[in-house]
Image: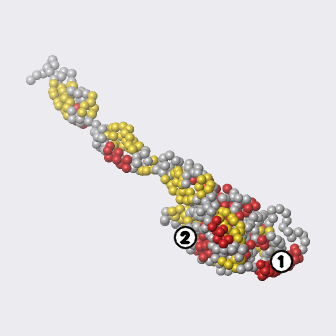
Amino acid sequence: MAGNGPLTGRTFNNRYQLGERIGVGGMAEVYSAQDMVLGRIVAVKTMLPQYAADPDFTRRFRQEAAAAANLQSPYIVNVYDWGHDQDTYYIVMEFVRGSDLKTAILERGAINQRKVAEIGSQVCQALTVAHQQDIIHRDIKPQNIMVQPDGNVKVMDFGIARAKNSTADKTETVLGTAHYTSPEQAQGKDLTAASDIYSLGVVLYEASTGTLPFDGPDAVSVALMQVRDQPLAPREINPDIDPVFEAIILTAMQKDPNARFATANDMRLALNDFLAGRPVNLAALVAGGAAAAAIGAAGAGMAHAATNSDFTQARTSVISPIGVAAGDMDSTQVMPVAAVGAGGGGTPTRRYSGGAAPGSGSGNNEGSGKKKAIIAVCIVAVLAIAGVLAFMFLGGEKQDVPDVTNTPYEQAVAEIEAAGFQVGEIKTQYDDTVEEGQVIGQNPKGGTKANKGSRIDLWVSQGSEQVDMPEVVGMPEADAKKALTDAGFIIGEVTQQYSDDVEEGLVVSQDPVGGQAANKGSVVKLVVSKGSEQVPVPNIEGLSLDAARKKAEDAGLTINQTGSEHSDTISSGCIISQSPSAGTKVAKGTAINYVVSLGEDNTVNVPNVVGSSESYAKSALEGAGLRVSITYSASNSVAKGNVINQSRTGSAKKGDTVTIDVSTGPSTPEPGTPTE
């Protein structure tokens, strides 16, 4: 919604002048603005008019400023200031260049899973900072994750965040975004950091598949799905997704908060292990401990918890919608609490790709549920007895498991067999840090106890995965980054330099170079053109040619004579005028054109004074810079006192002498003229 908004041009508190509207959310709109005190561009978030008079929303708005201002992280948008101007509350924030993750998903569909994992890891770091201060975001969604040109992210919009132990907001409605809200948030329950982890799981699901896990005609139906339904496995939508990454996503999206990652930092560790190709031990990172075993076997990437295979559908009832905009479910909004009836806890139903879920027919679901519960208890009891009997009769001597990590595969096998164990399943995976053929991990771990003769599974390194490096030189920066990330590389340092040959905004060079094999996941550095370097033109007027040439060369320019003129003020051999004028910015190497002085011009036009009076003739000639010499002669044709002739006409040098001959009258008296 970029463009002019109703507040464009307004200045808040004589400091923040609002420009273009750059976004509109559920309760606020955001403008770019000029901070006239510090002279920088900022983003100003203003409450929408319909909420400005509501004390509850204004409290939340002030709360956002206070919460976000105390969160210091490179992955959280900085808050600089907040205030109230006339009837509007506003928050002044860091202006982040880039686009939100939702826009990227809409434009590109499924995003490369490694890039999604990197984004998830950075969001986890931001959430860790917030959670350590007991701040729960409560509205994690791709619209609130800004992706900057360098690929790093900034989490924003703590508008409905609140302290973990706050009770002020406990009502029969909840704030959030239906597509990303956690089951406990949809039900109006007390929230913990696990709620943000669930929402981030939904974000990673959508970004890696291009599809939302739950969608429906309105916010209420979507919120109910969050409570009771299981999503399709991401790999059913996008088969290219790694099973390990799928397991991380589904762990974050567990209905039970205790079955999710214990902390955002634990989720970050899992994502980082996945990116590095290391085994992902979900069991050690999940809050419920034992519950993690159902999600994945030491990072093997099982898609679903075994216990999720036969969920029955619970009866549900919903409080009437309050303020829900059915057509805009991606906006933060007031939603009713999704209450699950009868069972109280809300048993989830599994989503199937086709057909109805088992037990969802017209029969007595409640009775069926009880029968299944009894059967489940019996199965658990039988398994427990079987486990005890197996331990009594089959359990052998316990002994130390050797640690064979970071050893060659052949040596690891020899050590395992020498210790009385068997080599179990062998899995290979790429690893940028461990040499090919070396053992990366094992299960059980070295130093633990296990039955003699039992199996030890191994993960063996295949070394760094080699893929073709795209050639991105000459491409626009954004296209180059996309090509590299789509190929599985990480964008490293992006620097800019001037180039006379490469257009501004295009890639000048890359490291490593394109067209050859490189380690997948390695960092690629880019150099982007700033175009021809622009320098200010120096002032060379009045300088000698040598001085002007040196001054121009010092600025990276040259000089070029285009003409010469006489000048009464500029000495001969010096520069009268230049083009471009001083101060103009031009590309390096540009020539400054100049006109050189020939010095003062001494040539003057000699006035024609023949027939003029002596006094006028003398004045005119001297006024032209000439000297005057006067002779007198009798003349019968020229009146006495007037000039008969002059020695020079045309042009002459200043200071030259011009002789004029002045008439003394007739030489003899005319007849009849009286004489003395």
Q: Residue at x 60, y 68 (%)?
A: 406
Quadrant of the rendered image containing residue 654: top left
Residue type pointed to by label 1: Ile
Mark 2 or mark 1, which has the lower sequence index? 2
The location of residue 387, given as percent across then percent down, is 78, 79
**Which residue position holds label 2?**
81
The location of residue 202, given as percent across then percent down, is 70, 66
Q: Quadrant of the N terminus?
A: bottom right
Residue at the extreme left of the image, as rendered? 676
Q: Residue at x 73, y 63 (%)?
A: 234
Q: Residue 32 or 416: which is nearer the viewer? A: 416
In the image, is residue 504 above or below residue 456? above
SS state under label 1: helix
The location of residue 316, given as percent across then percent down, is 82, 73
Q: Is residue 337 left or right of residue 52?
A: right
**Which residue position holds label 1?**
379
Say if residue 126 shows up in the picture. Answer: no
In the image, is residue 544 above or below residue 400? above
SS state under label 2: strand
Q: Quadrant of the C terminus?
A: top left
Residue type pointed to by label 2: Asp
Mark 2 to mark 1: distance in Å?
60 Å
Q: Is residue 176 left or right of residue 358?
A: left
